[in-house]
């Protein structure tokens, strides 16, 4: 979806020129996709014990895209996250250690139970203080997969946005041409800056932190702000959607069949028989 209505933050500015491009990357702290998830005692959250927390995978593509643009055109990259205190460590490891210039963590108890709109309001307020030329984030967070925060931030800031971007290149001093996969082809869209783009898998190959980067990250600025510092209060991020409960998927009654046989040919013959006679798939 591409919104043509926008508010120009810096009229007449040539954004894409050396040293002037300012990029904000929105990054979320999520459980590792390889973690064994258990539901906490309250029945509405994940038990954090023994669960590794990382930057959401799609946000890593956004970080890499921002760093590549900085290396090509100069400027500044700022990472912003809204979440628990543990998100600060993630910002250092997954953002500052890779080359991001500084980071901001929006930390407030009112955000612990908010929904995507509340999170977007906090992030939009943090972005508004930065006045970026470009805002990047993953197309979705791998924990809840709502794919809502990026477009919501764009709407709150009255900026154009393009979702599920697989490639982006400057087309002029104040616009980008972006590509995204659609059914049966590739869609090409020109979007004027400032804008919000959400990154898809395959956009690039995220880099690893070097030892020098890890050491340097310890000295880079990482500010923690609450809602009051952003001009918001708890009511502004009060959830419109309430999570009632979490449940694990039911155990499958059919656990599958291990086909026995003296040879590969015998096993194949038995598999074909089962598919034909029992599964009725052939």
Image (tube, rainbow, N blue to C red):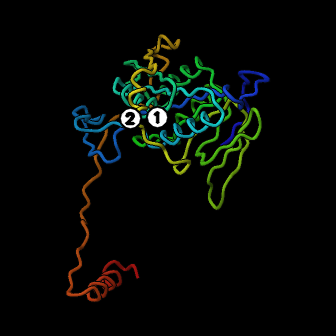
The quarter of the picture where residue 124 lies is top right
- Which label number is shown at residue 89? none
Residue at the location (53% across, 31% down)? 25
Q: Position of residue 271 (x, y in %)?
A: 30, 82
Q: Nearer the viewer, residue 175 or 73?
A: 73
Q: Position of residue 61 (x, y in %)?
A: 51, 42
The quarter of the picture where residue 168 lies is top right
> How far apart are the two marked residues, 2 and 1, measured between alpha carbons?
10 Å
* Label located before the other in sequence (2 or 1): 1
Q: Position of residue 209 (x, y in %)?
A: 42, 37
Residue at the location (62% across, 25% down)? 132
Vertically, is 264 above or below 124?
below
Q: Which residue is mark 2?
A: 211
Residue at the location (40% across, 18% down)? 108
The number of numbered badges drawn on the structure is 2
The quarter of the picture where residue 21 lies is top right
| Badge nearest the viewer, 2 or 1 | 2
Q: Which residue is mark 1?
A: 98
Q: Specify whether 5 is left or right of 24.
A: right
Q: Name, please, the residue furthest toward the front.
A: 212
| Quadrant holding the C terminus | bottom left
Disc 2 crowd rating (10 Å Cα; few below 14, some 14-19, many 20+) is few
Vertically, is 78 above or below 229?
below
Q: Secondary structure at mark 1?
A: helix
Q: Specify whether 87 is left or right of 199.
A: left
Find out whether the residues at labels 2 and 1 contact each other: C-beta distance under 8 Å.
no
| Quadrant holding the N terminus | top right
Q: Nearer the viewer, residue 26 or 43?
A: 26
Q: Position of residue 69 (x, y in %)?
A: 62, 36
Q: Secondary structure at mark 2?
A: helix
């Amino acid at each position: 979806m591409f919104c043509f209505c926008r508010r120009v933050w810096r009229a007449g500015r040539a954004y894409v020129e050396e040293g002037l491009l300012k990029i904000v990357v929105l990054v979320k702290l999520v459980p590792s996709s390889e973690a064994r998830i258990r539901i906490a005692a309250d029945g509405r959250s994940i038990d954090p014990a023994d669960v590794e927390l990382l930057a959401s995978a799609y946000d890593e593509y956004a970080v890499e895209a921002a760093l590549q643009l900085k290396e090509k055109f100069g400027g500044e990259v700022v990472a912003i996250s809204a979440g628990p205190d543990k998100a600060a460590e993630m910002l250092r490891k997954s953002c500052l250690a890779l080359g991001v210039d500084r980071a901001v963590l929006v930390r407030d108890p009112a955000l612990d139970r908010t929904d995507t709109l509340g999170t977007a309001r906090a992030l939009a307020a943090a972005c508004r203080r930065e006045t970026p030329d470009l805002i990047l984030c993953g197309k979705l967070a791998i924990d809840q997969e709502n794919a809502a925060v990026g477009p919501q931030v764009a709407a709150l800031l009255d900026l154009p946005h393009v979702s599920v971007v697989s490639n982006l290149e400057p087309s002029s001093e104040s616009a980008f041409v972006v590509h995204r996969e659609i059914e049966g082809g590739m869609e090409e869209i020109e979007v004027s800056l400032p804008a919000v783009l959400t990154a898809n898998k395959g956009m690039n190959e995220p880099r690893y932190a070097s030892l020098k980067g890890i050491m340097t990250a310890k000295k880079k600025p990482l500010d923690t702000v609450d809602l009051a510092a952003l001009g918001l209060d708890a009511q502004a991020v009060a959830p419109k959607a309430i999570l009632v409960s979490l449940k694990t998927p039911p155990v499958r009654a059919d656990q599958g069949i291990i086909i026995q046989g003296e040879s590969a040919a015998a096993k194949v013959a038995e598999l074909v028989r089962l598919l034909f006679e029992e599964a009725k798939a052939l």
